[in-house]
Every structure is written in C-alpha cells, then in structure tokens.
Image (cartoon, grey):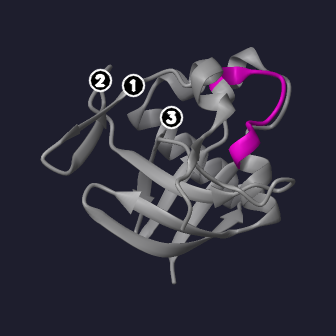
C-alpha cells in the first residue's frame, strides 16, 4: 500500500487531535476511542486515512460523518460510499472491514447511542439541516 494521504477534511474540520500512546489512540479532548479507516479516494484512487471517533455495536464499529455539523458530508464519507472495503486500524490492530451506510430506525438508534456517549454529536445535529450519515464498519 502506498503511503496514505491525510484527509483534507481532517485539517479543516476534525474537532480533535489524536494521540498514540502504547498502541492506543484517543482524542485528547475527552479520551474517546479513535479508529483510522484507510479509504480509497472516489475520484483519485489514492489511499487516505482519517482519524475518527467511534463507538461499538456488538462486534461492529460505528462512525458518524458529522463534519462537525457542516452543511456537506466529509470527503471520507464519499470515499466509503464509492469504495466500501477498507483497512481499519484501531489501537495496534489493523484489519479488513466493509462499510455500510445505515438507514431508518437503525441509523437513529446508532446515532443516538453515540450522541449519548459523545455529547458533541447532538450539537452537530442541531447545526445542520442535512441528515448526518451513520456508517457501520464490519470486520471481513
């Protein structure tokens, strides 16, 4: 794999910094867990990596395309929709995963579960008129 590019969304919209300490990654602001999906660019075909906070639903990893409540979805979301097979790094573990965008009741349940743990997601929901996508990453 070529050296991944950092997502352009990260510099502009990432609301947290990631810290690597003994193979564990946490956001500095609240010590939320951070996942790093390695995505393939929808237009470029290049590999990108974007640190994102996540929660779990059973064995599945849940990430939310909030872009801090911006009016548009983040680039990494478009990459996942176009190319749902990713490499996911969490702590010292790296594995293949497949992304799927949730809909309806499942989307609501997962968004609300993450917002309950990470209050900023309620604020992001209030800041935008778009429905913020919720993505499930499943190990393959």
- Look at the image and say whether residue 72 sits in the magenta stretch: yes
Whether 23 is drawn above or below 8: the answer is below
* Residue ID for mark 3: 115
For the residues bearing labels 1 and 2, Cβ distance under 8 angstroms: yes
Checking the image for residue 17, the label placed there is: 1
**What is the residue that sits farthest to the left in this orientation?**
22
- Between 115 and 81, the residue placed more toward the observer is 81
Q: Is residue 43 left or right of residue 75?
A: right
- Between 100 and 78, the residue placed more toward the observer is 78
Checking the image for residue 50, the label placed there is: none
Magenta residue span? 68-76
Distance Cα–Cα, label 3 vs label 2: 18 Å
Q: Secondary structure at mark 1?
A: loop
Name the image quarter holding residue 57: bottom left
Whether 89 is drawn above or below 84: the answer is above
How packed mark 3 is, by other alpha carbons closer than 10 Å (few <14, some 14-19, many 20 or more), is some
* Residue 123: image location, x then y, percent: 60, 18
* Residue 70: image location, x then y, percent: 75, 21
* Residue ID for mark 2: 28
Task: State the residue at coordinates (75%, 55%).
Answer: 41
Q: Secondary structure at mark 3?
A: helix
Q: Secondary structure at mark 2?
A: loop
């Amino acid at each position: 794999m070529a050296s991944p590019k950092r997502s352009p969304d990260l510099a502009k919209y990432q609301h947290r910094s990631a810290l690597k300490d003994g193979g564990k990654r946490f956001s500095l602001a609240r010590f939320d867990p951070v996942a790093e999906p390695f995505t393939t660019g929808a237009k470029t075909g290049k590999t990108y990596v974007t640190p994102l906070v996540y929660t779990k639903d059973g064995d599945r990893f849940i990430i939310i395309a909030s872009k801090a409540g911006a009016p548009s979805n983040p680039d990494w979301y478009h990459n996942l929709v176009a190319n749902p097979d990713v490499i996911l790094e969490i702590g010292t573990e790296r594995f293949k995963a497949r992304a799927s965008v949730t809909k309806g009741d499942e989307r609501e349940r997962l968004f609300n579960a993450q917002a309950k743990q990470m209050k900023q997601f309620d604020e992001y929901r209030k800041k935008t008129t778009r429905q913020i996508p919720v993505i499930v990453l499943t190990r393959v």
